Image (cartoon, rainbow, N blue to C red):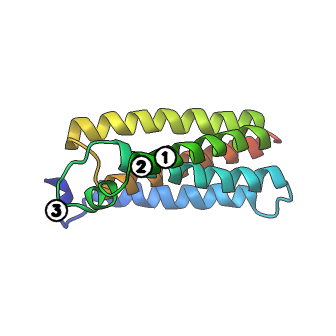
Amino acid sequence: RIMKDPHAGPFAIMMLAFLLISQCAFYTQFYGSTNWRLWASLLLGLMYERALSGLSIVLFPKARQDGLAKLFGDPTTKAVARTLLIVTLVLIGGLIAVGLWVGLAMIIFAGLWFGQYYRFTKKRYGGVTGDLAGFFLTIAEWIMLLILAVGTGLGW
């Protein structure tokens, strides 16, 4: 399947270049800012997306029985999933408290991406893999940076 193919096609390289260049552009939007809400939202957003990635490893079905997602997902118990959920809820509260409309936008769009990611992994691969969790994290980070850059550009 595609995950075992060591060759990257030209569109994969173009997408990677687009992601890296646009992330650079988003970060330059923040350069020199003394807005503590921006930096707090960035920090909370990065933690929030990583918590969502961890939840996907714990809660989503696994695509393979021998991958890293299965290895890290199996030893976890309901207590770990509950703890991750609590951390996620605390981060949601922090994002709303720090930057109301920007925080809400980050939560909503990350949630929409999380749902789409679940449908995509289940339909195309039969479940989540470690590579797909990394893919989720990369796109979620891009979404968070886009929202923060737009918010900063609008004078937030």
| Camera-nearest label, 1 or 3 | 1
> Sequence-wise, which precedes: disc 2 or disc 3?
3
Point out residue 45 in the picture as x, y percentages from the top left corner: 63, 50
- Is disc 1 in contact with disc 2, using a CB cutoff of under 8 Å? yes
- Which secondary structure, mark 3? loop
Residue where numbered disc 3 is placed? 5
Which residue is painted at 35% across and 61% down in the image?
A: 13
Q: Amino acid at mark 1?
A: Leu
Q: Amino acid at mark 2?
A: Phe
Point out residue 35 in the picture as x, y percentages from the top left corner: 85, 54
- Which secondary structure, mark 1? helix
Crowding at dot 2, Cα within 10 Å, few <14 / some 14-19 / many 20+, comes out as: many
Left/right placement of residue 78 relative to residue 3 reads right
Q: Find the distance from the CA under tag 1 to the CA under tag 2.
A: 9 Å
Which residue is painted at 72% across and 49% down in the image?
A: 41
Residue where numbered disc 1 is placed? 52
Residue where numbered disc 2 is placed? 136
Point out residue 43 in the picture as x, y percentages from the top left corner: 68, 57
Point out residue 20 in the picture as x, y percentages from the top left corner: 50, 61
Q: Quadrant of the C terminus?
A: top right
